Image (cartoon, rainbow, N blue to C red):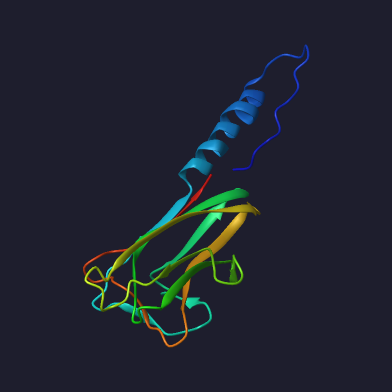
Amino acid sequence: MAWTTPKTWSSEPLTSIDLNTYVRDNQNHLKDRLDASANRIISSGAALLTTANAFVDVDATKLALTLTTHGGDVLLGFTGTAQNSLNSGAVYFNVAVDGADYIADEGFIGLKGAYSGDNNRIKPISFVLLISGLSAGSHSFILRWKASARNTASMDVVNLHPQFWAKEV
């Protein structure tokens, strides 16, 4: 349901059609926006791994979301873990919005260290990202990552279960 610009009232009579259009329908539109969300919680039998030095999908099925919006901003969030195979290694995260990386260069969040020789080797990683100015319609969001040179980045999805979500705001 689309938003209808409210009427500027003068001295004409109030009708049920006006009330339905400008009050009921606009309230339904606002409520629909509040209800629009998508999320995934991932669980698998093996950790996810990458050695890619350019952004690739973490899991194009399990960490991909589709959200139909009314136009405006979308809040994305992720909570999970990451680990590097090298002490000097790094893993960087990004999001593809409708097939294009949202941030260039090293993405918008990264984790250095957290290597497999560390006693506390699996490190938590979390973000909330505001995607501004999306048009009304269906949009795709895919979590992406890359590893630094000679590094293998991993994500535990066996014992810990990452969550990826999107909410129109």
Q: Where is residue 51, by image quadrant?
A: bottom left
Which one is nearer the viewer's eye here, 99 or 20?
99
Of 28 and 127, nearer the camera is 127
Q: Residue furthest top?
A: 11
Position in image of residue 114 (x %, y %):
33, 71
Q: Residue 61 location in percent, x, y?
A: 41, 73
Give how far across and how far down residue 163 sits, in percent: 35, 60
Q: Is residue 163 visible?
A: no
Q: Nearer the viewer, residue 109 or 79?
A: 109
Q: Residue at x 32, y 76 (%)?
A: 115
Q: Residue furthest front?
A: 88
In the rendering, at what x and y percent does residue 16 appear? 62, 22
In the figure, is residue 76 to the left or right of 138? Answer: left
Residue 17 visible: yes
Residue lying furthest bottom: 150
Determine the residue positioned at 57% across, 59% down.
138
Residue at 51%, 64% (x, y): give it.
141
Report the side of 41 relative to 146 (left or right).
left
Q: Number of callouts in the render?
A: 0
Q: Camera-side residue: 28 or 168? A: 168
* 104 versus 22 height, above or below: below
- When asked about the image quadrant of residue 120, the answer is bottom left
Image quarter of residue 1 = top right
Above or below, comparing residue 75 to residue 118 in the picture: above
